[in-house]
Image: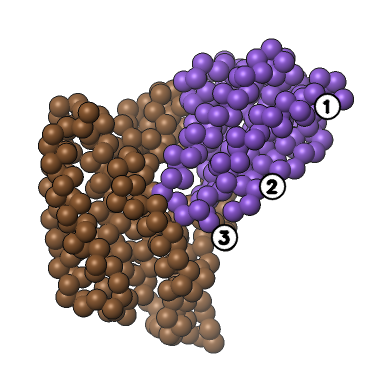
Amino acid sequence: MSEAIRVEEYLNVKKKALDLSCNVPDSIAVLPRNFAEARSKEDLLHENETATIRTLWRQKGITETPLEKKGEKIPFVFEESFAWIAPIIFFASAFISQNPYLVDTAIGVISNYLTDWFKGASDNEKKAILNLVVETKSGSYKRIRYEGPPEGLRNLPEIIRSTHDER
Amino acid sequence: MMNDKVSKFLVDFEKSINENMKFLYYTRGIEFQRNSVTELEALVKKLVKLKEDMIQIQDEESANTMLGLEEYLNVYINELKMLIFLKEDKMNDAWQSLIKAQYSLIFSLQASNIALRFGAKAHSQRLFLIEKLFFPPQTFLSSGFTAYSSKCSICNQEYGQCDHVVGKPYMGKLCHRIITNVKEVREVSIVDEPANKLCRVTSFLDNGLWRNLMTWRTEKKE
């Protein structure tokens, strides 16, 4: 299975979070799958794997700033697919510049999990889909879409950092 | 450090695998393949008993190893059953057995690395090739729904609140999610890469008759 990485513009995450009356993420956060399109907080839907990623991060001491305010709950979408579809992961500029190695930890823990997850699958069938949103130094937002085998995730931290440094 | 009882069992396990793998070919006599299934199923019973002993003494590594072996035996059993069903002209059952074998292999290696020493990696490729060479392309179905909550199968807490993670082994059991509060069913879609290859279109209406997609024969539907 080959891998594909695409980088494109994304909307202002912090403004959108404010517009939706959500917590404004200032470090790392999981965004709902329809974050860009949602018109109200009630429309938001998390990917099925959100809870898994949050647990993996918690175990590694990575503190997320969730969009949900205390006591709020965003429903999740369960769609059966052999591919492992991650939620959108948001990296705020401060998170990348203040903790550059935590980017490796945040992605590495997912990469390790997926390597174990797919260990018994045929090589032809291993596929992970990740969408990462990076706040750049200049305050713009870029989305990095990765589709390919779990082994390819190890290249993402460097791509995240170079996207962050873009002017 | 592996438990002595598990180490001893591994010797019997390896011997049994080596003796039975020669029947994983279509040309072998069906009577040998049936005997092989019976023999391996008896071994599963012994294995499950030993796994329970390991759980009893709270030896998690050994319990997970036994789970890995149990699932790996299920790979052999289901692959043999697939061959038997093919010979009996039961094509839908053959498909089910193949897919169960594929999933057992995934579960085996999620539980433990132990099956790697018996060639599990090559086995996954073999099962993939059997699917592509023996069976016609399938039309798979997948459901989609939204839910507010799910529970952890290990501790019964809200999934995400505890430290258990789906697909990881805990004291001889793999963690999975139990969806508890469905908000709405969204869709049933046709997909290329389903999570469950058992969910598929089995027949279609062809000039008033149902045509079986596996055999191409027409059949009556209740």
Within-10-Å neighbours for mark 1: few <14, some 14–19, many 20+: few
The amino acid sitting under disc 3 is Asp
- Quick check: A97 above or below B5? above
Q: Chain of mark 1?
A: A
The residue that label 1 is drawn on is A166
The amino acid sitting under disc 1 is Glu
| Residue A154 appears left or right of B196 | right
Circles 2, 1 touching at the beta carbon (< 8 Å): no
The residue that label 3 is drawn on is B192
Within-10-Å neighbours for mark 3: few <14, some 14–19, many 20+: some
Look at 26% across and 31% down and name the residue there.
Answer: B61
**Marks 3 and 2, how far apart in space?**
18 Å
Image hue for chain B: brown
Check if mark 3 and mark 2 are on a common chain. Answer: no
- Quick check: A25 above or below B149? above
| Label annotation for residue A64 | none
Image quadrant in which you'd find residue B102? bottom left
The amino acid sitting under disc 2 is Ala
Look at 21% across and 70% down and name the residue there.
Answer: B33
